[in-house]
Image (cartoon, rainbow, N blue to C red):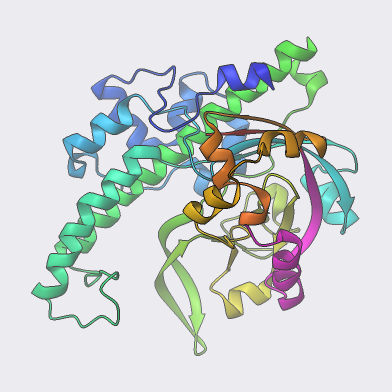
Amino acid sequence: MGVLHSEIPSGVGSKGKIRLSPQDERRLLTSGARWAVENGYGEASDLERIESGGYIEGADPELISQKAYERGRAQQGTLGSGNHFLEIQYVDEIYDEKAAQALGLFRDQMTVMIHTGSRGFGHQVCTDFLEVMERAVSKYGIELPDKELACAPFNSPEARDYLAAMRAAANYAWANRQCIMHWAREAFLRVFAATPKDLGMGLIYDVAHNIAKVEDHIVDGKNMKLIVHRKGATRAFPPGHPELPAAYGKTGQPVLIPGDMGRASFVLIGTEKAMQETFGSTCHGAGRMMSRHQAIRRAKGRAIWREMEDKGIIVRSAGRETLAEEMPEAYKDITNVVDVVHNAGISRKVARLRPMGVIKG
């Protein structure tokens, strides 16, 4: 854990080891994880197991504000804060042996799960375009049920610009996770003094959980192009879907649903029912039971790291407040949440992963 914690920067405002030139910035924003692989962060085979091959076309670096560039310049390859994490886990339960075998999972296997995104870069892109969208609501005479909502017609200049900027942020996120995964692999290679072949540390899947994508779906018996915005949700495409890599064509897309740092996370697979009922989507995580402020108050006087240690889980974080915000009881029980999506048929359980070590921002 110590090596991983020192190798992978985490916490609010953390800065990474990568220094991007203006040319690199623009290349990264248009090619995502491909940029990372081209620059030595991982293998070309990784790209086959990343949603959309690790990048999305249509990103326009010219639409990114100077402030977003400034925030993103030093944060590529960083974990960040809040609910972002890197977790060492082990497979303690297999629910579907055939699917688990296709995904390369087996009982008592060690795994690493990474949850992070586009960091301050993506946050700034969102902030910049919220102002644009708020003006668009008035401009196009749109009535919304909640003042927290904002939108623009798909073919409007505002919407086209937003989608092009959001795609740049998505590419930043795919590159970020790719770099972190690469350094995690290197840390394991160093600690175990193993060769990559002996270590056998391959990517299962990388899937976005806050992205808007144009997709084909059946609505009222007709094939239609839709914008599906998955916010706190993730894809759950079924066997045979054309966007899946060949390795998962017969199995369905791996679905990753992380829980809190004290209980478990799950790997599932997508289903045809998800396509019929939820536009090929399922939940992304457990969801909070209490706000961050409530959690901090509840944790007052407690040593969360020691409580975790008593459960056999080693925790490293940038500060005590983060552990308080992210303590297990701040979240719903992930087992109950996963049982709901499994029983609803919108994704199917494959394996349960128990935490052994956690790095939090």
355 to 253, vertically: above or below? above
Give the side of residue 57 with respect to residue 178, left or right.
left
Q: How many marks?
A: 0
| Left or right position of 162 against 325 | left
Name the image quarter holding residue 285.
bottom right
At a point 72% along the width and 73% down the height, the residue shown is: 340
Q: Residue at x 29, y 56 (%)?
A: 163
Q: Can residue 344 be found in the magenta stretch? A: yes
Q: Position of residue 260 (x, y in %)?
A: 66, 50
Eyeballing the image, is 205 above or below 215?
Answer: above
**Residue 231 appears in the rendering:** yes
Magenta span contains residue 232 = no
The residue that appears at 36% across and 48% down in the rendered structure is 57
Query: How far across and how far down the image is residue 341, in percent?
Result: 69, 70
Determine the image quadrant of residue 15.
Answer: top left
Camera-side residue of 77 and 243? 77
Q: Is residue 186 visible?
A: no
Q: Quadrant of residue 17?
A: top left
Image: 45 above or below 222: above
Q: Is residue 330 left or right of residue 89?
A: left
Q: Give the left or right position of residue 60, taking residue 3 as reference.
A: left
Farthest residue, direction bottom: 220
Quadrant that contains the N terminus: top right
| Residue closer to the observer: 48 or 108 | 108
Q: Which residues are magenta?
A: 331-355
